[in-house]
Image: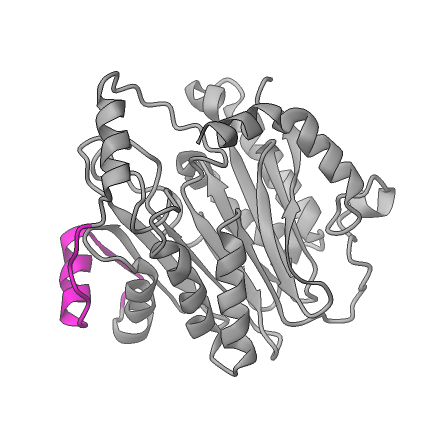
């Protein structure tokens, strides 16, 4: 854990060096790339493409890619990929092993959306390891978009899910240590980034997306962030593109972040420019806000041509990319400012 903290402290110079060295996804220091025309593919559609947030997005992408190439429907592929970090106790911000709230309860949120704009969501769900699977069934089997709390649990149990304890010994230990001071400061970085969001352009040129999280560590019991909210943590329009968020959910909710990124792409902006503009809008609205001390938000976006990008308010945000051209890899997002500012 200490090495990861050291990484964050060093990210000011490290991320700058990395982003200037990369020549894909808008990271090279050229005028064309700053406009988000990073892939140089013009109007020629590049497909399939999968992007997802953070390091744990890489194994998720790999599984989703495998499923997609095997002919599975896009939502099934997204579900299969997201179940990887949900079941990994070493991923401390998603599913099993996720940090609990201040009462020691692991509460989960997830949503999923297809190219027809059908969507399903669960929030404040406890005791179910795979909330993304429950969200998919909300989409497929109910007339609703979101189920919450005990109702979401009842629905999951009725569909054959098994209730289990998601608080690992490691997370319980960390929670008890936190109780010694009980200070809530939700710094969203590589240690506590509270989500995995995934966007997909499939072989047919259709968009879909999903998001799953255990939320910010030590949150108030009952708190729900942006991740399960369609239009905040995730949004797509199959005519235009898709976007997803990570970071402090309250800031994303206040600005309908992902929906606004998609709307800017509708107006003709590249994924990079759309992510950057909404991130800066969030900064401008929060620069005098009480949350500004620890505010971090980041967006990923993918348009119908297969062009993609990411951008964050502060340094340290990265995301996974999968396509036929370069395979599976991690890319570092450009950012507005460093953590020491």
Residue visible at 31% across and 63% down in the picture = 135
Residue positioned 73% across, 71% down in the render: 45
Residue shown at 27%/38% (left/top)?
A: 171
Q: What is the residue that sits farthest to the right in this orientation?
A: 31
- The answer to whether residue 209 is visible is yes
Question: On the picture, is 148 further left or further right than 337?
Answer: left
Residue 288 in the figure: left or right of residue 305: left
Direction from residue 244 to residue 82 in the image, left or right: left
The part of the image, by quadrant, that contains residue 266 is bottom right
Q: Does the stretch in magenta take in 199?
A: no
Quarter-of-image position of residue 131:
bottom left
Q: Residue at x 78, y 37 (%)?
A: 20
Which of 120 and 170 lies nearest the eye of the viewer?
170
Which of the pair 146/192 is nearer the observer?
Answer: 192
Q: Position of residue 75 (x, y in %)?
A: 44, 71
The part of the image, by quadrant, that contains residue 214 is top left
Question: Up-down: is 13 above or below 127?
Answer: above
Instruction: Please state which of residues 85 and 37 is positioned toward the viewer in this rendering.
Output: 85
Q: Pinpoint residue 104: horizontal percent, then vertical percent.
A: 19, 35
Query: Depth check: 226 or 103 in front?
Result: 103
Q: Residue furthest bottom?
A: 71
Locate the N terminus and report the quarter of the image it occupies: top left
Counting every numbered tag in the picture gives 0
Is residue 154 shown in magenta?
Answer: yes
Please provide the residue range marked out in magenta.
144-165
Give the x, y percent position of residue 208. 50, 67
Residue 113: image location, x then y, percent:
43, 65
- The chosen color scheme is one colour
Please identify the quadrant where the C terminus is shown. Answer: top right
Q: Can residue 100 be seen in this view?
A: no
């Amino acid at each position: 854990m200490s090495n990861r903290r050291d990484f964050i402290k060093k990210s000011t110079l490290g991320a700058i060096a990395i982003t200037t060295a990369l020549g894909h996804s808008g990271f090279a220091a050229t005028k064309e790339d700053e406009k988000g025309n990073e892939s140089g593919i013009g109007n020629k559609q590049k497909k399939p493409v999968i992007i997802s947030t953070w390091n744990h997005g890489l194994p998720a992408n790999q599984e989703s890619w495998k499923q997609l190439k095997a002919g599975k429907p896009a939502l099934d592929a997204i579900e299969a990929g997201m179940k990887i970090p949900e079941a990994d106790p070493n991923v401390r911000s998603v599913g099993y092993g996720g940090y609990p709230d201040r009462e020691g309860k692991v509460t989960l949120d997830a949503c999923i959306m297809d190219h027809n704009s059908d969507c399903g969501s669960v929030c404040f769900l406890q005791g179910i390891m795979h909330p993304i699977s429950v969200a998919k069934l909300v989409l497929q089997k109910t007339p609703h978009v979101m189920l919450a709390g005990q109702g979401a649990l009842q629905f999951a149990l009725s569909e054959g899910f098994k209730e289990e304890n998601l608080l690992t010994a490691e997370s319980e230990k960390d929670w008890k240590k936190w109780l010694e001071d009980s200070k809530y400061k939700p710094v969203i970085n590589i240690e506590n980034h509270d989500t995995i969001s995934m966007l997909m352009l499939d072989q047919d040129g259709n968009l879909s997306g999903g998001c799953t999280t255990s939320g910010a560590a030590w949150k108030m019991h009952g708190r729900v962030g942006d991740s399960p909210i369609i239009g905040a943590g995730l949004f797509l329009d199959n005519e235009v593109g898709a976007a997803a968020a990570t970071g402090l959910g309250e800031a994303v909710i206040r600005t309908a972040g992902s929906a606004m990124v998609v709307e800017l792409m509708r107006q003709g902006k590249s994924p990079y420019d759309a992510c950057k503009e909404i991130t800066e809008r969030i900064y401008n609205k929060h620069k005098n806000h009480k949350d500004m001390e620890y505010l971090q938000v980041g967006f990923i976006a993918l348009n119908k041509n297969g062009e993609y990008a990411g951008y964050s308010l502060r340094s340290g945000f990265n995301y996974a990319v999968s396509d036929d051209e370069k395979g599976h890899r991690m890319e570092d997002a450009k950012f507005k400012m460093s953590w020491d500012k």
